[in-house]
Image (tube, rainbow, N blue to C red):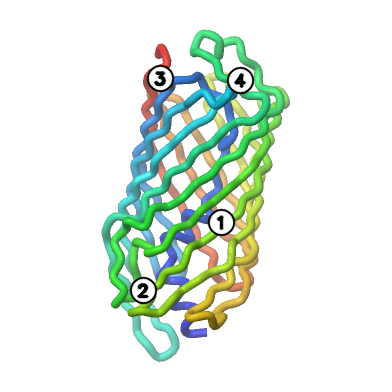
Amino acid sequence: MRVFWLCLLGFFCQQAYAQEIEARAYSNAPIGINFITGGIAQAKSGSYTLTTEAANLTRIIDVFGQSGRISLLVPYAQLSGTGSVGAQYMNASAEGLSDPVVKISANLYGAPALSLEEFKHYQQDLIIGASLAASIPWGKYNNEQMLNVGANRSLIQPAIGASQAIGPWRFELAGMATIYTSNTSFLGSNTLSQNPIYSSEAHAIYYFENTAYISADATYFMGGQKYVNGTAISGSQENWRFGSTFSYPINKHNSIRLTGSKGVYSNTNTDYTAMGISWQYRWGGGL
């Protein structure tokens, strides 16, 4: 049990990304539009707090006649907290670059590649899309300490999803797998490995006339058993999370977004509460 809790805390940063609930992952936008987003988010689990400032750059691209996007997320994090594991007192203090994430998405049906002028006449029906995300293990990592903001391993996350429009509503459903490489420098020269985490998520999104939207989000996770040097040190996870997103356009170039989510069930007590705020600026494509 002691080793399990240490592994949980040591990989809190990467776990938070793997369990992110993302609405509107499969939507259409004019080709050539660019988005840059800056924001801050905070996740809390017990007495431990992870604060992340992040910048995200996204470009909408033409993928064989359908719209797609490529994005780069660069996070900087501070992890802090105090607590005890058994009889051992632990003071968490870690700060630095977290692992960047590259994501490529391609709509497969229902989201044609359109110019800004053509997009003005577009009406969504059913969209089906797929994506692939991968983290780059460039984050700050010290194999002599338990708590780090970098994971010293990568995650690879393939996903597929659909979005159905009904009047001002969008209903989304997606499934994904999060696959982990091994960390061969875990507390010295130990090897930490992990089974994939399988997840599904659902969103109900309501659009207002000014293109502001609010969503109700839910996600379910299972799997992810961990091993140290081939010996299982935790059971499989089973988690439910619920959240909400609110986005408001300031003008045609700028918008602000508020997010929040909370773990409502976890068979391994690995849930956390998260809140965030971000500002997005868009340009290009004839804007």
At horizontal 70% and vertical 23% (from top left) the residue drawn is 125
Residue 200 in the image, given as x and y percentages of width and height: 66, 51
| Left or right: residue 222 compared with residue 270 | right
Where does label 1 land, which residue?
Answer: 178
Question: Which residue bears the numbered disc 4?
Answer: 112
Q: Nearer the viewer, mark 3 or mark 4?
A: 4
Tag nearer the camera, 1 or 2:
2
The numbered mark, 1 or 3, whose residue comes first in the sequence reads 1
Q: Up-down: is 5 above or below 273?
A: below
Q: Earlier in the sequence, mark 1 or mark 2?
A: 1
Per the model, the C-alpha gap separating discs 1 and 2 is 21 Å
Tell which tag, 3 or 2, sits nearer the viewer. 2
The total of numbered circles placed on residues is: 4
Disc number placed over residue 251 in the picture, else none:
3
Classify residue 164 as left or right of residue 11.
right
Amino acid on which the number 2 mark rests in the picture = Ser
Q: Between marks 4 and 1, how big is the CA–CA gap?
A: 28 Å
Query: Marks 4 and 2: which is nearer the front?
Result: 2
What is the x, y in percent for residue 126?
71, 27
State which tag comes first along the sequence, 3 or 2. Answer: 2
Q: Earlier in the sequence, mark 4 or mark 1?
A: 4
Instruction: Tell me the amino acid under the disc marked 4.
Output: Pro
- Looking at the picture, tell me which residue is in the foreground, 270 or 155: 155
Q: Residues within 10 Å of mark 3 (few under 14, many from 20)?
A: few
Labels 3 and 4: the sequence-earlier one: 4
**Is 116 or 103 nearer to us in this picture?**
103
Disc 2 target residue: 185
Disc 2 is placed on an element classified as strand
Residue 227 on image: x %, y %: 53, 77
